[in-house]
Image: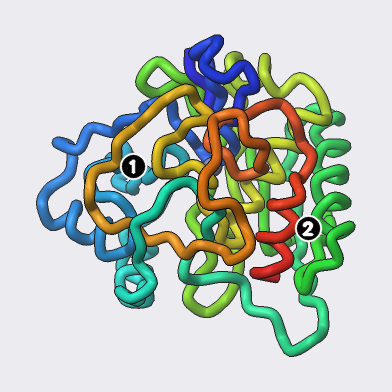
Amino acid sequence: MKRMIYSTGMAAMLAVVMIGCQKSSSDKADASALSADERNLIQSAGFNGNWAEKTSDGDYLVEGDILLTKAQLDELAVTAPAHELIIAGEEHYRTTNVVSTPGTSQRTITVRLGSGFPSYYSTGLDQALARYNALNLRIRFQRVTSGGNIVITGRNLGTSGGGCILGQASGFPTASGNPSSGFTLSTSSCATSYLNTANKVDEVIAHEIGHCIGFRHTDYMNRSSCGQNVNEGTAGVGAVWIPGTPTTVTGGYNSWMMACTNSNPAFSSADGTALNYVY
Ligand SMILES: [Zn+2]
């Protein structure tokens, strides 16, 4: 069972937990499930059209764990400037759209944990938000009990391609500069067996929030953290390299946005560089 959240075990276990965004285990999506028009749209939005799949709900799953609606793809296709599309190795990347921040003041992003989660999920969320806030970014996260810019819900996301899906992000920031509306943490038995401590919940939540505010997988080009070498082909993928971050990393590289988990919730120094550069 693969779990794509970054699993330390590296390839060792072949079990990679897909981190929060639904990194479905289907490392290679079934491209045949997409029409040529759909593949073109996904590519125009800055993603690899050869590595995407259509869900039963009619949405699109890209990079294994990011769920986008047709409307979101349409918006990204309009806003993704061609000159920012680059082909590169494994580094820290952000999406074209990021959360807008007014001037020099901090923007508060509210986060709400939905009902039905064990209490240590609440602890894990608090830890994740505290770690972000400790970086003193231009965005600051605050927990709320109603409403919320980013809402965390629970649902059984099942498995995909033999892998356990841990979570699924609802896209990336909007063109108007708001964060993605939230993400789902899977309540499946395979997901909850991984998410059995506050630290692991912290790790996955921090990763999912990373997508919500515009970060893509650090190793999206080959998913080396999952012990894989997924060739995404020559299609231009939309990812904006963040200056100051490494240009090459190995599967054991520690970053909160690696495709597969390593059970280490801590931000690396390059993670801090990336977050501080964007925010
Ligand atoms: Zn992810």
Identify which residue, 242 or 73, lies in the foreground. 242
58 or 87, which lies in front? 87
Residue 30 coordinates in the image, percent (x, y): 23, 32
Image quadrant in which the C terminus is located? bottom right
Say which label, 1 or 2, has the lower sequence index: 1
Which corner quadrant of the image does residue 128 belong to? top right
Residue 114, visible in the rendered structure: yes
The residue that disc 1 covers is 57
Residue 185 pos. (x, y %)? 62, 35
- Which secondary structure, mark 2? loop
Residue at 39%, 23% in the rendered image: 160
Percent from the top left, x then y, of residue 219?
A: 49, 42
- Are circles 1 and 2 on residues that touch, CB within 8 Å? no
| Outermost bottom residue | 103
Give the Cα distance between marks 1 and 2. Answer: 27 Å
Of residues 83 and 34, which is closer to you in this image?
83
Residue at image point 66% right, 27% down: 262
Instruction: Please state which of residues 104 and 59 is positioned toward the viewer in this rendering.
Output: 104
Ligand 1, seen in the image, is in the quarter at top right
The local secondary structure at tag 1 comes to loop
Residue under the point 87% across and 45% down: 126
Q: Is residue 118 left or right of residue 5?
A: right
Q: Is residue 22 above or below residue 162?
A: below
Give the residue type at disc 1: Asp
Q: Is residue 148 above or below residue 22?
A: below
